[in-house]
Image (cartoon, grey):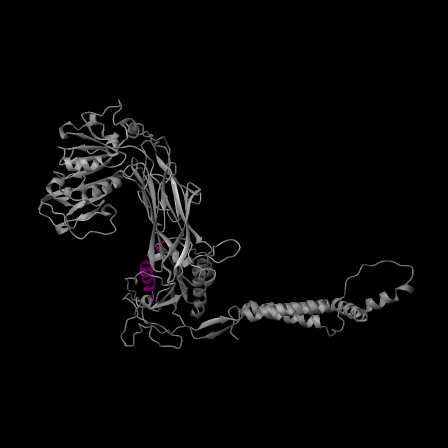
């Protein structure tokens, strides 16, 4: 029998030592007595324990000798060999996305996948190496090319489910790079294969899939929004719930505001459909809204501590959060000749006052720092203000964008249906007479594409400041005559003003977020939903924003300024100028009273001020229908991403759908890995049976040592049985 550590057989030297214990004389203390007449029994015992006496038969001695021999063999690690079923170099990819937390298999899919992966490594050839990749929101290597299987087990055991959508294509791409280092490599993927679409990637190594999971029972919250009515008086909550099961489901929806229950509703969900729920009259004092799917409707089973059945198999998408923007009066300054369409659309924004100023009168005396948004119409100043900017028909190149010409009757390109600025905006019948030809800056994204890649509308973060550029004047098109115009201006102003330094919408898990630094502060402190804090400092002195990437936990994050006291913003006190009157030559074009019949100007001026040192909150939610669809997919699509299976040149070679049979077939990229040597056999250590034998011998030895006690117990029981029969 082959041994991994044959030197451990030196432990057999303890066998003579055990025998010597049975031969050596017992040590006794010497005492002087007047006579030995009464000590005959003692003398006989001393003679019986003379040193190096003849060894007598003893069952305990035999058991102890066997125990020492088996322990020595166990330490030598005997094994048997068999053909290996895996390549010499294995890249193990384990899916840790949110769907792997489903409990349709015990205890969940990730634990089942980890166990399946460790079981598969038993087919690893002797001396083979293993790399481990965790495939969550991003792919990361947690073990790289090690032959220590103990380290691999520890790395795999430490994996946890990430509450985020997974990127298996990124993980396969990374696995392909690791597998290309050697000629004989294989990629093993442990996943539920619940993919919205097959991974668009090709790797030059065979791929083997260990699929886990069997159910698809799940209902999820896929959207949550808090909306303010046009009157700015009431707010409503809109929730979208998706039933991703093939059967109808009854669930209960609970709405919580700042930790108190506001409303509960029973919702009936049809199979493979979405249901929208609206809740009106959200209290004005609520700052954070939490929505929960806590169980079934009336009479349906609910999850609880008593072990009752869970309402669905995935709990991570049964909760969602939304931060309610604080009520405050926002100031907009319109610099230009006065486009009536633009000023009218801005005047109907809720909780907004619009002021106008001529281009020649704009300057430091206008106090641009007191406004939440400045709209430049057909003009741009020499020095841009440090606030949110909307440039309409910019006349020349500037930090906002480069003007390289003009466009005559430009056509609108294909629009992104997921673009938030274009929600409910229909530009299908819009015609534009003329527009500026702009080059898209690196900091911006295209919202409305034009001909030849020239954007007609783009927006983004410019040096930490929200900025948007519209390439044409509204009066140069028929857009102001359509319903889409006020909706577009409302969505665009909402993104530019934002209400606070927090992101305007919920953030996907593990997505970096850019946080604004208030004036006077030197850094930020972020408190995660679990209570942990992170101190952030800007990368460069004077930076206006800090990027925070620790958004891996679902819930509400709180951001506070550190290192100084933020200066209060005069624009938040209800007056655009320090003396209470419009600054410079700015003329008030509108007020909330104009948009709200029955409201008074005094009421608008008494809007509560916003404390610049107040915490900023933002929510991280898993709004992913693809990730909430937990039905296990087909492993064939993942296997098809691999290629170049190893030719079956030895009994341990593994087969793959992509096996190459041509003599000159390549197994991997031309990296100089060399030809494939025959694989070493796999080893199965025999520690399991030997350990059971050791435990059995210990039990037998204990029973033999305590045999007198067993005899007494047996006699006592036998004596009591006749008495009971007689009774």
Counting from the top left corner in percent of width and height, residue 464 is at 27, 39
Where is residue 356, by image quadrant? top left
Considering every residue shown, the one lying at the far front of the view is: 598
In-front residue for pair 686/35: 686
Where is residue 328, by image quadrant? top left
User: Is 88 one of the magenta-colored residues?
Assistant: no
Considering every residue shown, the one lying at the far top of the view is: 579
Q: Residue placed at 41% from the left, 67% from the top?
A: 128
Counting from the top left corner in percent of width and height, residue 268 is at 38, 55
Counting from the top left corner in percent of width and height, residue 403 is at 12, 42
Q: Is residue 12 visible?
A: no
Please, what is the dominant secondary structure of the magenta stretch?
Answer: helix
Q: Is residue 501 visible?
A: yes
User: Is 168 one of the magenta-colored residues?
Assistant: yes
Give the quarter of the figure containing the C terminus: bottom right
Is residue 674 placed above or below 466 in the rendered structure?
below
Q: Count the numbered circles shown.
A: 0
Left or right, 166 with reference to 370: right
* Residues in magenta, as a range: 164-182
Left or right, 575 with reference to 526: left
């Amino acid at each position: 029998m082959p041994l991994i550590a044959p030197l451990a057989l030196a432990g057999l030297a303890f066998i003579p030592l055990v025998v010597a214990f049975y031969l050596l004389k017992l040590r006794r203390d010497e005492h002087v007595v007047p006579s030995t007449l009464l000590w005959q029994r003692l003398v006989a015992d001393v003679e019986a324990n003379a040193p190096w006496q003849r060894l007598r038969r003893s069952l305990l001695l035999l058991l102890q000798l066997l125990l020492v021999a088996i322990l020595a063999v166990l330490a030598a690690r005997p094994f048997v060999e068999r053909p290996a079923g895996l390549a010499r170099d294995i890249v193990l990819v384990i899916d840790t996305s949110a769907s792997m937390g489903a409990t349709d298999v015990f205890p969940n899919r990730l634990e089942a996948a980890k166990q399946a992966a460790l079981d598969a490594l038993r087919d690893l050839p002797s001396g083979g190496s293993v790399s481990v990749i965790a495939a969550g929101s991003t792919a990361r290597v947690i073990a790289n090319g090690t032959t220590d299987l103990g380290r691999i087990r520890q790395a795999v055991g430490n994996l946890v489910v990430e509450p985020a959508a997974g990127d298996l294509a990124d993980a396969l791409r990374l696995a392909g790079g690791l597998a290309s280092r050697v000629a004989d490599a294989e990629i093993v993927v442990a996943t539920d294969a619940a993919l919205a679409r097959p991974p668009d990637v090709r790797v030059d190594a065979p791929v083997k899939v260990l699929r886990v999971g069997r159910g698809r029972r799940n209902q999820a919250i896929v959207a949550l929004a808090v909306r303010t009515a046009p009157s700015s008086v009431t707010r409503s909550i809109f929730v979208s719930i998706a039933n991703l099961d093939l059967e109808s489901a009854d669930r209960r929806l609970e709405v919580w505001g700042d930790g108190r229950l506001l409303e509960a509703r029973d919702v009936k969900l049809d199979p493979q459909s979405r249901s929208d729920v609206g809740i009106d009259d959200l209290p004005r004092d609520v700052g954070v809204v939490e929505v929960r799917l806590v169980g079934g409707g009336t009479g349906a089973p609910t999850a609880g501590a008593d072990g009752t059945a869970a309402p669905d198999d995935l709990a991570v998408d049964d909760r969602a959060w939304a931060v309610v923007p604080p009520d405050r009066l926002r100031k907009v300054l319109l610099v230009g000749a006065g486009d009536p369409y633009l000023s009218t659309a801005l005047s109907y924004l809720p909780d907004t006052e619009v002021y106008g100023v001529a281009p020649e009168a704009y300057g430091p005396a206008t106090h641009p720092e007191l406004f939440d948004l400045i709209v430049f119409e057909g003009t741009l100043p020499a020095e841009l203000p440090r606030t949110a900017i909307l440039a309409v028909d910019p006349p020349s190149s500037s930090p906002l964008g480069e003007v390289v010409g003009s466009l005559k009757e430009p056509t609108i390109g294909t629009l992104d249906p997921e673009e938030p600025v274009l929600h409910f905006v229909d530009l299908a019948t819009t015609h534009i007479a003329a527009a500026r030809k702009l080059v898209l800056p690196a900091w911006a994204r295209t919202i409305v594409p034009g001909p030849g890649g020239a954007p007609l509308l783009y927006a983004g973060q410019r040096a930490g400041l929200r900025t948007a550029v519209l390439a044409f004047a509204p009066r140069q098109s028929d857009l102001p005559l359509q319903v889409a115009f006020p909706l577009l201006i409302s969505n665009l102003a909402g993104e530019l003003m934002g209400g606070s330094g927090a992101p305007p919408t919920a953030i996907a898990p593990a997505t970096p977020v850019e946080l604004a630094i208030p004036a006077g502060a030197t850094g930020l402190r972020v408190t995660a939903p679990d209570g942990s804090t992170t101190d952030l400092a800007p990368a460069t002195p004077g930076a206006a924003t800090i990027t925070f990437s620790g958004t891996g936990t679902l819930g509400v994050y709180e951001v506070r300024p550190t290192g100084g006291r933020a200066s209060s913003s005069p624009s938040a006190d209800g007056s655009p100028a320090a003396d209470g009157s419009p600054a410079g030559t700015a003329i008030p074009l509108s007020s909330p009273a104009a948009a709200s019949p029955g409201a008074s100007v005094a009421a608008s001026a008494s809007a509560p001020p916003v404390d610049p040192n107040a915490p900023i909150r933002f929510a991280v939610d898993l709004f992913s229908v693809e990730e909430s669809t937990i039905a296990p997919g087909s492993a064939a699509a993942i296997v098809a991403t691999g290629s170049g299976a190893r030719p079956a040149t030895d009994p341990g070679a593994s087969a793959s759908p992509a096996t190459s049979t041509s003599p000159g077939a390549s197994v991997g990229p031309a990296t100089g890995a060399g030809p494939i040597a025959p694989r070493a056999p796999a080893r199965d250590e025999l520690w399991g049976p030997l350990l059971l034998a050791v435990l059995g011998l210990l039990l037998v030895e204990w029973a033999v040592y305590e045999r007198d006690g067993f005899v007494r117990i047996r006699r006592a029981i036998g004596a009591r049985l006749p008495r009971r029969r007689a009774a």
